[in-house]
Image (tube, rainbow, N blue to C red):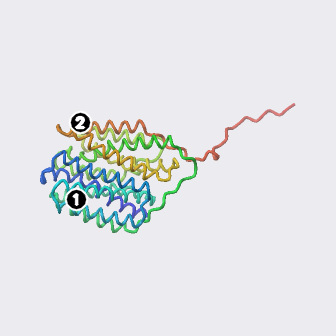
């Protein structure tokens, strides 16, 4: 099951959502895409992702629905080079976002385990596509072909119906987690959208490959320990800010960014389930995607003088997410706790 989940996540997230990041500089140079239009297309995808996440809150995706979403995902990728104009591109990226969210929640509900690393593998593949094919139309077509191969591998993925875990639902803890994860969506997506463009030259696409390779290791690096989520968010904030503050820090920045964001997602989703919320993955994904809709919108006014201000804003938002992140709940049932040791009373007489 982990292999199928990894393939689904690589197709839906690594390729379906994030291939746009390394292709963006090509479309800017070759298709006349302006920074404002680039942000609008990013917003279209994130808006679609938000809609898809809301749908999965109402009804968990089935095996058949997951298959439909995989087909739509490949079709929207293949359609990008066949049309020209913001209207058509906007619709295609919107539909791709809906499909990505459905496949993501389906894969999470299939208990992917190490399969979460598939997101990072897909991101690395998306970067390699752009490095190997420096023409924007060709890059989209090759990306569609890679996504199709991954969709075949994920075709028999069997999502499970989410179940409530034993114990009491902890609403306050979940509210804090939801707030933190939504803020992470805002800050993270600004970096994910503009990081490659901020690192000029061929190093940009190579940096995206490095992000993917680091992300593939992220679930192993970020484990659900007591302060893991807070620490990972703080490290990610540093990684996002580095390119704007320190010249020549692109390598370190990409490793810090890539090495945390999938682990953050896996840890947050695990904590949500441990808090007793049966649809935690769908609800948290909806909040995360709402943050992603806001991210490009708040960053766009800062893009007139380059990407530094937008990256610093993103770093500040992720730092705030670290401050608001709750510690994971104890997994030991209250009745299983060891009673306090008492000193036996002295015998009478």
The mark lying in front, picked from 1 and 2, is 2
Q: In this view, does 311 lie to the left or right of 218?
A: left
- The residue shown at (24%, 43%) is 250
- Residue 348, x across and y down, in percent: 85, 32
Q: Nearer the viewer, residue 195 or 77?
A: 77
| Secondary structure beneath label 2 | helix
Q: Which of 45 and 325 is in front in this view?
A: 45
Disc 1 marks which residue? 129
Disc 2 marks which residue? 309
Q: Quadrant of the N terminus?
A: bottom left
- The residue shown at (47%, 62%) is 160
Q: Is residue 259 left or right of residue 85?
A: right
Q: Nearer the viewer, residue 214 or 66?
A: 66
User: Given the current orientation, which residue lies at the most extreme top position?
Assistant: 349
| Secondary structure beneath label 1 | helix
Q: Which of marks 1 and 2 is nearer the N terminus?
A: 1
Q: In which quarter of the image is residue 138?
A: bottom left
- The residue shown at (42%, 57%) is 108
Question: Count the marks: how many?
Answer: 2
- Residue 7, x across and y down, in percent: 35, 62
Residue 272, numbered circle: none
Q: Against 275, is 134 above or below?
A: below
- How far apart are the alpha carbons under marks 1 and 2? 29 Å
- The residue shown at (41%, 41%) is 179
User: Given the current orientation, which residue lies at the most extreme right position?
Assistant: 349
Q: Quadrant of residue 256?
A: top left
- Residue 349, x across and y down, in percent: 87, 31
* Crowd band around label 1 with a 10 angstrom C-alpha radius: few (<14), some (14–19), many (20+): many
């Amino acid at each position: 099951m982990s292999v199928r989940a990894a393939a689904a996540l690589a197709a839906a997230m690594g390729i379906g959502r994030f291939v746009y990041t390394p292709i963006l500089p090509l479309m800017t140079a070759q298709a006349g895409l302006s920074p404002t239009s680039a942000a609008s297309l990013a917003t279209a995808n994130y808006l679609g992702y938000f809609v898809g996440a809301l749908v999965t809150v109402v009804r968990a995706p089935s095996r058949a629905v997951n298959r439909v979403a995989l087909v739509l995902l490949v079709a929207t990728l293949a359609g990008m080079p066949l049309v020209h104009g913001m209207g058509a591109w906007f619709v295609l990226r919107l539909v791709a976002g809906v499909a990505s969210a459905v496949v993501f929640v389906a894969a999470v509900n299939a208990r992917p385990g190490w399969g979460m690393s598939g997101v990072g593998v897909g991101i690395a593949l998306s970067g390699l596509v752009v490095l190997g094919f420096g023409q924007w139309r060709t890059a989209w077509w090759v990306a569609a072909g890679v996504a199709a191969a991954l969709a075949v591998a994920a075709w028999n993925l069997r999502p499970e119906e989410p179940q409530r875990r034993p114990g009491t639902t902890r609403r306050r803890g979940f509210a804090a987690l939801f707030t933190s994860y939504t803020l992470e969506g805002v800050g993270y997506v600004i970096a994910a959208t503009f990081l490659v463009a901020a690192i000029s030259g061929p190093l940009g696409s190579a940096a995206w490959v490095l992000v993917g390779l680091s992300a593939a290791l992220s679930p192993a690096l970020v484990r659900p320990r007591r302060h893991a989520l807070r620490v990972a968010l703080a490290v990610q904030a540093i990684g996002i800010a580095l390119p704007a503050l320190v010249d020549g820090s692109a390598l370190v920045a990409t490793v810090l960014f890539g090495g945390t964001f999938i682990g953050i997602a896996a840890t947050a989703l695990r904590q949500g389930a441990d808090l007793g919320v049966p649809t935690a993955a769908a609800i948290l994904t909806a909040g995360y995607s709402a943050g992603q809709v806001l991210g490009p919108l708040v960053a766009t006014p800062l893009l007139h003088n380059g990407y530094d201000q937008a990256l610093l804003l993103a770093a500040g938002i992720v730092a705030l997410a670290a401050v608001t992140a709750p510690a994971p709940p104890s997994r030991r049932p209250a009745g299983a706790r060891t009673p306090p040791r008492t000193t036996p009373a002295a015998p009478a007489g």
